Amino acid sequence: MNNNRKIFEEVQNFVQNYDLNKDGSVTSYDIYLSFLKKMNGDVYKASQATGVLCSTIDMDHDGKFTYCEIAKYCVDKAKKQIEQNAEIAALADVEAMLLRFDKDKDKKLSQTEFLEYFKGRGYTPYSDRDQYLKIIDLDKDGCVSVNELQEWFKKRRIDYATMLSARGPNC
């Protein structure tokens, strides 16, 4: 529900930014005029930008933008941002995790330390308590390193973005 509300707000912002005549709808001409204004009357640049944006959003090429088309554009844009920021966000996740669970401060999480993370969330990730080592511990040393954790968190963020994008808006 929260994701749909956020998508709705993004669509509203999109319409407000490009609906110059304030009729509540957006057409390719509205977008062109908006770009023309933002680009100080440069017809060539405004035409190019309009073409790119319209070909990205207007999936049925009718020159009008439906809620679903704009919402899909907003979801795809959010997915792209999540993917671009996944590396940095994953590093922040790892740092926070190490601060809290790396009891011996060796910049690795032992099996016991790693399982504490899941216990704190109220669940164990797998019935086989060593299963996470098979998935995350790429060098098979019995511990999860910073790099392994970062890759794991990054993958989880990208998987989440992909799931959001696949679900798309409720149209």
Image (cartoon, rainbow, N blue to C red):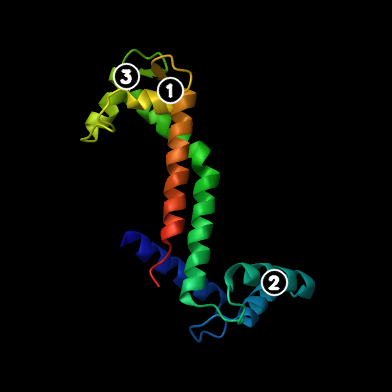
Q: In the picture, residue 43 is in which quadrant? A: bottom right
Q: Amino acid at mark 2?
A: Gly
The residue under the point 36% across, 64% down is: 4
Can residue 69 be seen in this snapshot?
A: yes
Q: Position of residue 154 (x, y in %)?
A: 47, 37
Q: Residue furthest left?
A: 122
Which of discs 2 and 3 lies nearer the camera? The answer is 3
**Residue 51's mark?**
2
Query: Is 148 in front, or is 78?
Result: 148
- Cβ atoms under marks 1 and 2 closer than 8 Å: no
| Residue 16, horizontal then vertical, whole percent | 50, 75
In the rendered image, the residue lying farthest to the front is: 128
Residue 13 visible? The answer is: no
| Residue 111, position as x, y percentages in the image | 32, 19
Q: Please identify the quadrant where the N terminus is shown.
A: bottom left
How many other residues sit within 10 Å of disc 2, few (<14), some (14-19) or many (≥20)?
some
Q: CA distance from mark 1 to mark 3?
A: 10 Å
Q: Mark 3 — residue?
A: 111
Between marks 1 and 2, how big is the CA–CA gap?
47 Å
Judging from the image, what secondary structure is the residue with disc 3 in?
helix
What x and y, as percent, mark residue 118? 27, 31
The 10 Å Cα crowd at callout 3, few under 14, some 14 to 19, many 20 or more, is some
The amino acid pointed to by label 1 is: Asp
Quarter containing the C terminus: bottom left
For label 1, the crowd category at 10 Å Cα-Cα, with few meaning under 14, some 14 to 19 and many 20 or more, is some
Q: Which residue is mark 1?
A: 137
> Does residue 13 lie above or below 98 as drawn?
below
Give the mark nearer the N terminus: 1 vs 2.
2
| 127 lies left or right of 32 | left
Residue lying at 25% horizontally and 30% vertically, measured from the top left: 127
Q: Secondary structure at mark 2?
A: helix
